[in-house]
Amino acid sequence: MDKKAAAKTGFLSGILNGLFGSGGGIIAVSLLKKSGIEQKESQATALLLMFFLSAVSVGIYYFEGRLSFPDAAAYIPGGILGGISAALVFRKMNPNLLRKIFGGFVTFSAARMLWGILEKWIF
C-alpha cells in the first residue's frame, strides 16, 4: 500500500473509531487485505492501528470530561481475558475460517446497525 493510500485508510479508520468506538478496524482489515496482506497479518495490523487510534480518542474524551473510569473498569478484566483467549486461538486458526468469521461479523454488525435505523423510522 502506498503512503497516500495508507494515510487515507488511517484517516477513515480514525474517524470511525472516534465516532463509534469501533468500525475503524473493519475498514483497516479490508483495505490491508486489498493491498495484498494476508488475513491474519491484516487483522493483527488493524489491532495495532486500533490501539493507537483508541488511545488518541480516549485522551480527547478524557480531557473533555466524557469518560467514566468506574463504568469502564467493570469491563476491563473480561476484555483482557477475551483478548488473550482470542490471540491464542487466532494463532492456530485456519485463515479461510478466520476470513469467514470476520465476514460474518461484519455482516451481522451492518444488519444490526441497519435494523436500528429502520426501527427508528418504522416505530
Image (cartoon, helix red, strand yellow):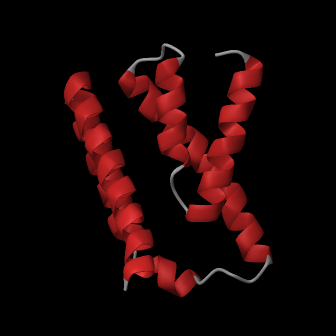
Q: Quadrant of residue 82?
A: bottom left
> Please, which residue is most extreme toward the front here?
122
Judge whether 92 appears above or below 16 on screen. Answer: above
**Residue 43 image offset from top left, x and y in percent:** 43, 34
Judge whether 29 appears above or below 73 on screen. Answer: above
- The residue at the point 35 percent across, 67 percent down is 115
- The residue at the point 56 percent across, 63 percent down is 20
Quarter of the figure with the C terminus: bottom left
Q: Is residue 95 left or right of residue 48?
A: left
**Residue 3 image offset from top left, x and y in percent:** 75, 20
Q: Is residue 61 left or right of residue 118?
A: right
Q: Quadrant of residue 92?
A: top left
- The residue at the point 26 percent across, 24 percent down is 95
Q: Can residue 54 be seen? A: no
- The residue at the point 54 percent across, 28 percent down is 31
Quarter of the figure with the N terminus: top right
**Residue 122 image offset from top left, x and y in percent:** 38, 80
For the image, the number of numbered tags is 0
Q: Can residue 18 be seen? A: yes
Judge whether 79 appears above or below 51 on screen. Answer: below
Q: Is residue 10 left or right of residue 89?
A: right
**Residue 96 image offset from top left, x and y in percent:** 23, 24
Q: Quadrant of residue 13?
A: top right
